[in-house]
Amino acid sequence: MDPLVVEFVGEEYSVPSTAQFTFGRNGDLEIDSNPYLHRRLGVFAHDSDQGWTLYNVGSSIAIDLTDSSSTSRMTVAPGSSVALSFEETILTFSAGPHTYELCVEVPVSRGDFALEDPPTGTQTISVSDMLLTPDQRLCLVGLAEARLRDRAAGFDAIPTNRQVAARLGWKITKFNRKLDNVCDKFARAGVSGLRGDASSLATRRRERLVDHALTVGILTEADLDLLKD
Protein backbone atom coordinates (compact mmCIF):
# COMPACT_ATOMS: atom_id res chain seq x y z
CA MET A 1 0.00 0.00 0.00
CA ASP A 2 1.20 3.51 -0.79
CA PRO A 3 2.42 5.51 2.23
CA LEU A 4 0.75 8.48 3.87
CA VAL A 5 2.59 11.69 2.98
CA VAL A 6 2.80 14.52 5.52
CA GLU A 7 4.21 17.91 4.47
CA PHE A 8 5.21 20.72 6.81
CA VAL A 9 7.01 23.92 5.68
CA GLY A 10 8.47 22.20 2.65
CA GLU A 11 9.59 19.01 4.40
CA GLU A 12 7.87 15.76 3.39
CA TYR A 13 7.53 12.66 5.54
CA SER A 14 6.52 9.29 4.07
CA VAL A 15 4.67 7.09 6.56
CA PRO A 16 4.20 3.37 5.79
CA SER A 17 0.96 1.70 6.86
CA THR A 18 2.90 -0.40 9.38
CA ALA A 19 3.97 2.68 11.38
CA GLN A 20 2.45 5.41 13.50
CA PHE A 21 3.42 9.03 12.94
CA THR A 22 3.24 11.58 15.76
CA PHE A 23 3.49 15.35 15.65
CA GLY A 24 3.69 18.13 18.20
CA ARG A 25 6.41 19.80 20.21
CA ASN A 26 8.12 16.41 20.24
CA GLY A 27 7.44 13.38 18.08
CA ASP A 28 8.27 12.13 14.62
CA LEU A 29 7.50 15.62 13.36
CA GLU A 30 8.74 18.31 15.75
CA ILE A 31 6.56 21.29 14.85
CA ASP A 32 8.01 23.93 17.16
CA SER A 33 9.42 24.47 20.66
CA ASN A 34 6.38 26.64 21.44
CA PRO A 35 5.42 25.76 25.08
CA TYR A 36 1.72 26.22 24.28
CA LEU A 37 1.94 23.30 21.85
CA HIS A 38 1.37 19.79 23.24
CA ARG A 39 4.38 17.50 23.25
CA ARG A 40 2.24 15.14 21.19
CA LEU A 41 -0.81 16.67 19.63
CA GLY A 42 -1.70 14.20 16.89
CA VAL A 43 -1.07 10.64 15.78
CA PHE A 44 -1.63 9.16 12.33
CA ALA A 45 -2.26 5.41 12.49
CA HIS A 46 -3.42 2.87 9.91
CA ASP A 47 -6.00 0.14 10.39
CA SER A 48 -6.12 -2.65 7.83
CA ASP A 49 -9.92 -2.53 7.68
CA GLN A 50 -10.65 1.20 7.78
CA GLY A 51 -7.56 2.98 6.55
CA TRP A 52 -5.74 6.03 7.96
CA THR A 53 -7.06 7.75 11.07
CA LEU A 54 -6.01 10.96 12.82
CA TYR A 55 -6.11 10.82 16.63
CA ASN A 56 -6.07 14.08 18.57
CA VAL A 57 -4.16 13.01 21.70
CA GLY A 58 -3.85 16.53 23.11
CA SER A 59 -5.89 17.88 26.00
CA SER A 60 -6.90 21.36 24.87
CA ILE A 61 -6.04 22.04 21.21
CA ALA A 62 -8.57 21.30 18.48
CA ILE A 63 -7.40 20.34 14.98
CA ASP A 64 -9.28 21.68 11.96
CA LEU A 65 -9.37 19.54 8.81
CA THR A 66 -10.16 21.01 5.40
CA ASP A 67 -10.50 19.20 2.08
CA SER A 68 -8.14 20.97 -0.31
CA SER A 69 -10.45 20.30 -3.27
CA SER A 70 -13.76 21.40 -1.73
CA THR A 71 -15.27 23.44 1.10
CA SER A 72 -15.68 20.38 3.35
CA ARG A 73 -14.35 21.02 6.84
CA MET A 74 -14.42 19.33 10.25
CA THR A 75 -12.91 19.79 13.69
CA VAL A 76 -11.24 17.02 15.68
CA ALA A 77 -11.64 17.79 19.37
CA PRO A 78 -9.07 16.72 21.99
CA GLY A 79 -9.42 13.04 22.80
CA SER A 80 -11.30 12.21 19.60
CA SER A 81 -10.37 10.84 16.20
CA VAL A 82 -11.51 10.86 12.58
CA ALA A 83 -10.94 8.67 9.53
CA LEU A 84 -9.08 10.57 6.81
CA SER A 85 -11.48 10.48 3.89
CA PHE A 86 -10.12 13.42 1.85
CA GLU A 87 -7.47 12.65 -0.74
CA GLU A 88 -5.56 15.76 0.30
CA THR A 89 -6.28 17.24 3.73
CA ILE A 90 -5.09 20.51 5.25
CA LEU A 91 -4.65 20.38 9.03
CA THR A 92 -4.57 23.66 10.97
CA PHE A 93 -4.24 24.25 14.70
CA SER A 94 -3.27 27.10 17.00
CA ALA A 95 -1.05 27.07 20.08
CA GLY A 96 -0.35 30.30 21.93
CA PRO A 97 0.32 33.09 19.44
CA HIS A 98 1.08 30.75 16.53
CA THR A 99 -1.02 28.85 13.98
CA TYR A 100 0.38 25.85 12.11
CA GLU A 101 -0.59 24.04 8.93
CA LEU A 102 0.15 20.52 7.71
CA CYS A 103 -0.75 19.03 4.35
CA VAL A 104 -1.57 15.31 4.31
CA GLU A 105 -1.96 13.14 1.20
CA VAL A 106 -4.00 10.01 1.94
CA PRO A 107 -3.34 6.95 -0.30
CA VAL A 108 -6.65 5.64 -0.24
CA SER A 109 -11.06 4.35 9.12
CA ARG A 110 -10.45 4.06 12.41
CA GLY A 111 -8.83 1.25 14.38
CA ASP A 112 -7.44 0.59 17.80
CA PHE A 113 -3.84 1.50 18.41
CA ALA A 114 -1.51 1.64 21.38
CA LEU A 115 0.26 4.96 21.78
CA GLU A 116 3.95 4.60 22.35
CA ASP A 117 5.64 5.60 25.60
CA PRO A 118 4.34 8.98 26.85
CA PRO A 119 6.74 11.88 26.24
CA THR A 120 8.63 13.71 28.92
CA GLY A 121 9.93 17.25 29.08
CA THR A 122 8.69 20.78 29.56
CA GLN A 123 5.07 21.02 30.69
CA THR A 124 2.61 22.14 28.04
CA ILE A 125 0.78 25.40 28.71
CA SER A 126 -2.88 24.58 28.09
CA VAL A 127 -5.60 27.06 27.12
CA SER A 128 -8.01 25.08 29.28
CA ASP A 129 -5.75 25.77 32.27
CA MET A 130 -6.11 29.54 31.91
CA LEU A 131 -7.69 31.20 34.90
CA LEU A 132 -10.96 33.03 34.33
CA THR A 133 -12.34 35.58 36.73
CA PRO A 134 -15.83 34.78 38.08
CA ASP A 135 -17.36 37.44 35.81
CA GLN A 136 -15.48 36.14 32.77
CA ARG A 137 -16.73 32.60 33.40
CA LEU A 138 -20.27 33.88 33.94
CA CYS A 139 -20.05 35.77 30.65
CA LEU A 140 -19.06 32.55 28.87
CA VAL A 141 -21.78 30.50 30.56
CA GLY A 142 -24.40 33.08 29.58
CA LEU A 143 -23.35 32.84 25.94
CA ALA A 144 -23.15 29.04 25.97
CA GLU A 145 -26.25 28.30 28.08
CA ALA A 146 -28.39 26.93 25.26
CA ARG A 147 -25.62 24.66 23.95
CA LEU A 148 -24.72 23.49 27.45
CA ARG A 149 -28.33 22.40 27.90
CA ASP A 150 -28.53 20.86 24.43
CA ARG A 151 -25.26 20.02 22.66
CA ALA A 152 -27.23 19.51 19.43
CA ALA A 153 -28.29 23.18 19.41
CA GLY A 154 -26.90 25.21 16.54
CA PHE A 155 -25.12 28.54 16.55
CA ASP A 156 -28.46 30.29 16.10
CA ALA A 157 -29.21 29.31 19.71
CA ILE A 158 -26.47 31.63 20.97
CA PRO A 159 -28.19 34.75 22.37
CA THR A 160 -27.37 38.35 21.53
CA ASN A 161 -25.21 40.46 23.80
CA ARG A 162 -28.28 42.28 25.15
CA GLN A 163 -30.07 39.01 25.87
CA VAL A 164 -27.11 37.66 27.83
CA ALA A 165 -26.70 40.94 29.72
CA ALA A 166 -30.37 40.81 30.72
CA ARG A 167 -30.06 37.14 31.71
CA LEU A 168 -27.12 37.97 33.99
CA GLY A 169 -28.65 41.16 35.34
CA TRP A 170 -25.78 43.26 33.94
CA LYS A 171 -25.74 46.51 32.04
CA ILE A 172 -24.93 46.01 28.38
CA THR A 173 -21.76 48.08 28.75
CA LYS A 174 -20.51 45.71 31.45
CA PHE A 175 -21.25 42.62 29.37
CA ASN A 176 -19.53 44.06 26.29
CA ARG A 177 -16.46 44.88 28.37
CA LYS A 178 -16.30 41.37 29.86
CA LEU A 179 -16.77 39.80 26.42
CA ASP A 180 -13.91 41.91 25.04
CA ASN A 181 -11.70 40.80 27.94
CA VAL A 182 -12.47 37.11 27.41
CA CYS A 183 -11.89 37.32 23.65
CA ASP A 184 -8.59 39.15 24.14
CA LYS A 185 -7.44 36.56 26.71
CA PHE A 186 -8.08 33.60 24.43
CA ALA A 187 -6.79 35.39 21.32
CA ARG A 188 -3.48 36.03 23.10
CA ALA A 189 -3.35 32.31 23.87
CA GLY A 190 -3.68 31.52 20.17
CA VAL A 191 -7.40 30.89 19.67
CA SER A 192 -8.26 32.06 16.16
CA GLY A 193 -11.39 33.88 15.05
CA LEU A 194 -11.70 36.24 18.01
CA ARG A 195 -10.12 39.26 16.38
CA GLY A 196 -10.77 40.89 13.04
CA ASP A 197 -12.51 43.79 11.40
CA ALA A 198 -15.60 45.22 13.05
CA SER A 199 -18.15 43.44 10.85
CA SER A 200 -16.72 39.92 11.08
CA LEU A 201 -15.82 40.27 14.75
CA ALA A 202 -19.33 41.28 15.77
CA THR A 203 -21.05 38.43 13.95
CA ARG A 204 -18.68 35.50 14.48
CA ARG A 205 -16.58 35.84 17.61
CA ARG A 206 -19.35 34.73 19.99
CA GLU A 207 -19.89 31.53 18.00
CA ARG A 208 -16.14 30.85 17.87
CA LEU A 209 -15.76 31.57 21.59
CA VAL A 210 -18.58 29.22 22.60
CA ASP A 211 -17.41 26.50 20.20
CA HIS A 212 -13.87 26.64 21.59
CA ALA A 213 -14.98 26.69 25.24
CA LEU A 214 -17.09 23.56 24.72
CA THR A 215 -14.58 21.76 22.49
CA VAL A 216 -11.66 21.96 24.93
CA GLY A 217 -13.79 21.50 28.06
CA ILE A 218 -13.46 24.98 29.56
CA LEU A 219 -17.21 24.85 30.24
CA THR A 220 -19.30 21.87 31.34
CA GLU A 221 -22.94 21.38 32.28
CA ALA A 222 -21.96 21.91 35.92
CA ASP A 223 -21.29 25.58 35.13
CA LEU A 224 -25.02 26.09 34.58
CA ASP A 225 -25.32 26.20 38.36
CA LEU A 226 -23.71 29.65 38.18
CA LEU A 227 -26.83 31.06 36.50
CA LYS A 228 -29.78 32.27 38.50
CA ASP A 229 -33.22 30.85 37.73
Image (spheres, rainbow, N blue to C red):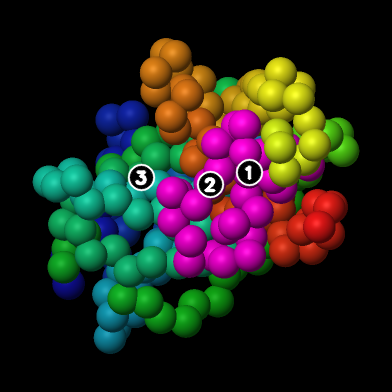
Specify the farthest residue to the top: 197
The disc label shown at residue 207, or none: none
Q: Which comes before the other along the chain, label 3 or label 2?
A: 3
Classify 10 Å Cα crowding around label 1: few (below 14), some (14-19), many (20 and above): many
- Between the residue at mark 3 and the residue at mark 1, the CA separation in whole angstroms equals 28 Å
Give the residue displayed 71% in from the left and 18% down from the top: 173
* Circle 1: residue type: Leu
Question: What's the magenta region?
Answer: 138-164
Label drawn at residue 158: 2
Which residue is denoted by mark 3 in the rendering? 91
Q: Is residue 104 visible?
A: no
Q: Position of residue 5 (x, y in %)?
A: 25, 52
What is the residue that sits farthest to the left in this orientation?
A: 69
Residue at the image point whose x is 36% and y is 45% from the top? 91
Q: CA distance from mark 2 to mark 1?
A: 6 Å
Q: Indicate which disc, 2 or 1, sits on the residue closer to the N terminus.
A: 1
Q: Which residue is mark 1?
A: 143
SS at badge 3: strand
Looking at the rendered structure, the kind of residue marked 2 is: Ile
Q: Quadrant of residue 35?
A: top right
Residue 78 is left or right of residue 35, and the answer is: left
Structural crowding at the residue carrying mark 2, measured as other residues with C-alpha within 10 Å and reported as few (<14), some (14–19) or many (≥20): some
Among the two numbered marks 3 and 1 on one chain, the one whose residue lies closer to the N terminus:
3
Q: Kindly identify the residue that appears in the image at 57 percent across and 66 percent down.
A: 150
- 208 over 20 or under it: above or below: above
